Amino acid sequence: AVEAPDTKNLRVKLVLLGDSGVGKSCIVLRFVRGQFDAASKVTIGASFLSQTVALQDGTTVKFEIWDTAGQERYASLAPLYYRGASAATVVYDITSAESFQKARFWVKELQKHASAGIVIALVGNKSDLEDKREVPFEEAQAFAEQNQMALFIETSAKTADNINELFTNIAKKLPVKPA
Ligand code: GDP
Ligand code: MG
């Protein structure tokens, strides 16, 4: 007998892109381990961390999260990294206009070269540093809308603000398909 595809338990490769220092590793560690360590210098490298999100409709989404080792410097290697990804988060730091310019570049790059149907989220991290803000919320939101992005959200890995919401919202946007 042909088994029905498992549409209730999804497994999803998610990659993080963005400048060095914007907080990609901290976002992952906050989401997966519930920790923030301002001193830690973690980049996960070749392996990945995973974490499962349970949605209200009973669907579970297991994220296999690929943090980067040097993708920031070697943009030419990025396609190897986002190949096969169903979701991507493009992260900038709200206190760095330069990091937002880089984020715009990554969004265009993904829209041109990543798998069709990839869910791309634009993430403004370090929302706890409001007094140092360089990137207006409205500017990033407008960019996300103009580029038909699935999601725009501001987060703080430090305070945990919107970290679970980020991954839950991505999970809700995924096209349902077999794990
Ligand atoms: P990555 O290079 O993108 O992986 O960035 P990291 O996760 O290594 O973080 C870079 C620096 O930003 C570290 O010193 C973190 O402590 C700090 N950082 C990360 N997220 C936040 C945040 O939400 N708020 C604040 N204030 N600092 C953060
Ligand atoms: Mg890192």
Image (cartoon, rainbow, N blue to C red):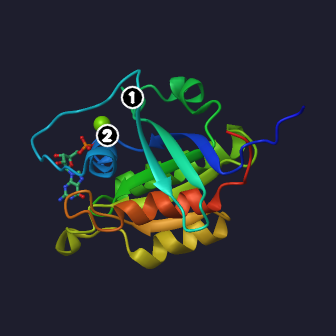
Judge from the rendering whether residue 66 lies leftward or rightward of residue 174; answer left or right.
left
Judge from the rendering whether residue 125 lies leftward or rightward of residue 103; answer left or right.
left
Which residue occupies the extreme bottom position in the image? 138
Judging by the rendered image, the residue that carries numbered circle 2 is 20
**Earlier along the polypeptide chain: callout 1 or callout 2?**
2
Q: CA distance from mark 1 to mark 2?
A: 8 Å
Q: How many marks?
A: 2
Residue appearing at x 32%, y 50% in the figure: 27
Which residue type carries mark 1? Answer: Arg
Residue 171, x across and y down, in percent:
56, 57
Residue 65, x across and y down, in percent:
45, 38
Judging by the rendered image, the residue that carries numbered circle 1 is 73
Judge from the rendering whether residue 103 lies leftward or rightward of residue 25; answer left or right.
right
Q: Are marks 1 and 2 in contact (CB under 8 Å)?
A: yes
User: Around disc 2, counting alpha carbons within 10 Å, would you say few (fewer than 14), some (14 to 19), or many (20 or more)?
Assistant: some
Q: Is residue 104 above or below residue 159?
A: above
Q: Nearer the viewer, residue 31 or 22?
A: 31
Which residue occupies the extreme front position in the image? 1
Judge from the rendering whether residue 17 lies leftward or rightward of residue 108; answer left or right.
left
Give residue 170's quadrant in the image: bottom right
Quadrant location, the N terminus:
top right
Residue 37, x across and y down, in percent:
13, 46
Q: Is residue 25 above or below residue 69?
A: below
Q: Secondary structure at mark 1?
A: loop
Which residue type carries mark 2? Answer: Ser
Which residue occupies the extreme right position in the image? 1
User: Around disc 1, counting alpha carbons within 10 Å, would you say few (fewer than 14), some (14 to 19), or many (20 or more)?
Assistant: few
Ligand 2 shows up in the quarter that is top left
Q: Secondary structure at mark 2?
A: loop
Quadrant location, the C terminus:
top right
